[in-house]
Every structure is written in C-alpha cells, then in structure tokens.
C-alpha cells in the first residue's frame, strides 16, 4: 500500500464520519419537529394527527438511539421493534404490535382520545431521555 492509498483511505473514513454525523443531526431535527407538531395537534384536539406525529417521532428517535448506541443502521419500524424487545424499552407488555395496530387504526377511525396520544408520548419521552 502506498502513502497515497493510505491518505485516500483516511480521507474516505473522515468523509463517511462527517456524512453520518450530518444525517444523524438532520434526523434528530426532524424528530424534534415532529414531536413539536404533535404537541400542537394535542393542544388543538386533533388527536389523530398528534398520534401520527408522535409515532413518526418515536421511529426517528428509535433510529437515532440504535445508530448512536449500537452502531447499527435500521429503518424506523425495525428500530422500534428492536427496542421493544429490550427490557429497558419494553413499550407495552404485548410489544410494539399494540402501537402498530393503533397506528393503523388511526387511518380507519376519525375519533381518537387524548389518552392514545399520552400513551405513545411517554415512549417518545423515554427515548429522548436515553439519548
């Protein structure tokens, strides 16, 4: 290996680290924005949209947690499922199936209660604190 190859390899690693950091920062900003939007929807009593925004934020925070703590890149749903199986983030006794079913239910019914939003909000808060 020549000196030029070593320099190129180092440069490539640095570029990859910068790209990953930028992507994580962007994902964190999106998660915060979705969380803030959900809070606005709760105040305006639009619970279906609030639940959807909390769920989106939960997925983004789960991706961040898995990426930062475990150095694994997963999509939002897989990250949530992975964390739901850990003892620290056992979101519900039944696992994430309950939350996924509720998310699907949002599109099928027009009436949600605030308790639905409060339920998912506590999981988002636990992930935010863990980061």
Image (cartoon, grey):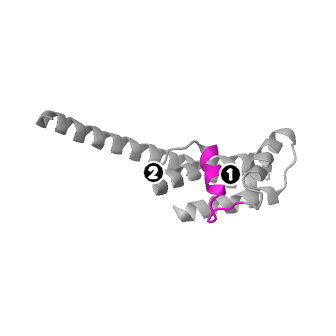
Q: Residue at x 48, y 50 (%)?
A: 67
Say if residue 46 shows up in the picture.
no
- At a point 34% along the width and 40% down the height, the residue shown is 16
Residue that carries the numbered disc 1 in the rendered image: 54
Earlier sequence position, callout 2 versus callout 1 = 1
Question: Is 33 positioned to the left or the right of 119 in the image?
Answer: left
Q: Position of residue 96 (x, y in %)?
A: 72, 52
Q: Is residue 113 magenta?
A: no
Q: Secondary structure at mark 1?
A: helix
Q: Quadrant of the N terminus?
A: top left
What residue does disc 2 label? 71
| Image quarter of residue 91 | bottom right
Q: Residue at x 65, y 46 (%)?
A: 56
Q: Nearer the viewer, residue 39 or 13?
A: 13
Over which residues does the magenta segment extend? 77-91
Residue 128 visible in the shown view: yes
């Amino acid at each position: 290996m020549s000196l030029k190859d070593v320099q190129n390899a180092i440069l490539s690693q640095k570029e990859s680290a910068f790209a990953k950091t930028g992507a994580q920062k962007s994902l964190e900003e999106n998660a915060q924005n979705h969380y803030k939007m959900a809070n606005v929807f709760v105040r305006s009593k639009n619970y279906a949209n609030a639940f959807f925004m909390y769920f989106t934020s939960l997925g983004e925070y789960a991706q961040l947690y898995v990426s930062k703590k475990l150095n694994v890149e997963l999509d939002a749903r897989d990250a949530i499922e992975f964390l739901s199986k850990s003892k620290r983030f056992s979101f519900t006794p039944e696992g994430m199936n309950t939350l996924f079913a509720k998310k699907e239910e949002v599109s099928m019914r027009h009436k949600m209660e605030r308790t639905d939003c409060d339920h998912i909000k506590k999981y988002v808060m636990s992930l935010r604190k863990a980061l």
